[in-house]
């Protein structure tokens, strides 16, 4: 989730105690191996044992189509202390797909095998290598071949978003096919896609039969959701996150995000209000907040602090 699940957001979500680990935004590996300082800028957790300030492990996500360069990059981030390496075969963005990255690889199962194997062979066995897939490019049955190739190449687990690339993010997500794949593999399968509420999670678990779940947009639209899911999975949390709705209920979250954003990526008066509006828009599109039309006009963080909406 480029530009959304950045380091301040990972630190904020880590405070809930609900997540087992987080995944960085993808870093594109195209014509050359990116220098290490690029990873330190986008994944500053590498300087802290690959963990957020509150201890949440962070996997480094790579995107690209060249197995040799991806392997060399994976080796570099592993030496830099990465908790895990995740390979992005799911991004549906046209720009990414035109440049041989993301979901376009779903059309070539043999290339998925080659990439996963190259990365798996490049890093120590103690570092997990995972793959993020969609059901296919335009054929949802393609997931079976692609998942088999990822497993055969040595993936530690796979995450499946329950849509094809052609479906983009149009609802619904299809969780039952994820369960079909899970039953055919010997590695863990993580279910992902359209888990916005506790009820969505329960249906996803029932239809997929999965024990592992990835929350993305749903967790941002409702920061209370990860705790609800964690409790359903039997994870004991230090405290319960109250339901969010009013601006007053969101203010502590806004303040904590501002705290974790200090100095990231560089001190900037534009970064924080822009990111806050981007984040809150996600909740607004789900119909969770009625006051977005007011805050979307804010230009400074001070306006967020003093607002009485």
Image (cartoon, helix red, strand yellow):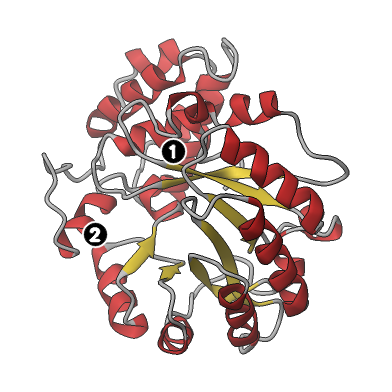
State the CA–CA distance, disc 2 to disc 1.
Answer: 21 Å
Q: Which mark is residue 226?
A: none
Assign the C terminus to one quadrant of the image. top left
160 relative to 300, above or below: below
Q: Position of residue 156 (x, y in %)?
A: 48, 65
Foreground of the two, 145 or 69: 69
Foreground of the two, 43 or 291: 43
Judging by the rendered image, the residue that carries numbered circle 1 is 280
> Looking at the image, can residue 78 be seen?
yes
Q: Is 187 positioned to the left or the right of 152 in the image?
A: left
Q: Residue at x 83, y 46 (%)?
A: 30
State how many labels appear: 2
Q: Position of residue 257 (x, y in %)?
A: 38, 25
Q: Which mark is residue 229?
A: 2
Crowd band around label 1 with a 10 angstrom C-alpha radius: few (<14), some (14–19), many (20+): many
136 relative to 117, above or below: below
Q: Residue at x 70, y 52 (%)?
A: 63
> Secondary structure under badge 2?
helix
Q: Position of residue 80 (x, y in %)?
A: 57, 32
Foreground of the two, 32 or 13: 32
Foreground of the two, 92 or 307: 92
Q: Residue at x 45, y 52 (%)?
A: 217
Q: Given this view, does label 2 or label 1 mark the residue nearer the observer? A: 2
């Amino acid at each position: 989730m480029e530009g959304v699940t950045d380091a301040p957001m990972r630190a904020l979500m880590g405070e809930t105690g609900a997540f087992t680990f987080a995944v960085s935004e993808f870093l594109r590996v195209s014509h050359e191996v990116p220098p290490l300082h690029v990873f330190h800028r986008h994944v500053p957790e590498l300087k802290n044992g690959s963990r957020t300030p509150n201890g949440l492990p962070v996997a480094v996500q790579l995107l690209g189509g060249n197995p040799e360069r991806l392997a060399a990059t994976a080796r570099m981030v592993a030496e830099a202390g990465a908790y895990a390496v995740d390979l992005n075969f799911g991004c549906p963005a046209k720009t990414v797909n035109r440049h041989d990255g993301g979901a376009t690889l779903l059309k070539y199962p043999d290339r998925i095998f080659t990439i996963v194997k190259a990365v798996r062979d490049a890093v120590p066995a103690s570092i997990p290598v995972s793959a993020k897939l969609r059901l296919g490019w335009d054929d949802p049955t393609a997931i079976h071949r692609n998942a088999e190739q990822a497993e055969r190449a040595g993936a530690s687990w796979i995450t499946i978003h329950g849509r094809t690339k052609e479906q983009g993010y149009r609802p619904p997500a299809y969780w039952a096919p994820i369960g079909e794949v899970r039953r055919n593999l010997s590695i863990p399968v993580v279910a992902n896609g359209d888990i916005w509420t506790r009820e969505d999670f329960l249906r996803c678990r029932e239809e997929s039969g999965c024990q592992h779940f990835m929350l993305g947009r749903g967790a941002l639209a409702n920061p209370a959701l990860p705790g609800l899911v964690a409790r359903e999975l039997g994870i004991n949390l230090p405290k319960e996150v109250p339901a969010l709705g009013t601006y007053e209920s969101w203010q502590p979250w806004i303040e904590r995000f501002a705290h974790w954003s200090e100095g990231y990526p560089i001190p900037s008066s534009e970064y924080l209000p822009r990111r806050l509006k981007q984040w809150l828009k996600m909740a607004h599109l789900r119909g969770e907040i009625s006051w977005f039309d007011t805050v979307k006009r804010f230009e400074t963080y001070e306006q967020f602090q003093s607002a009485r909406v």
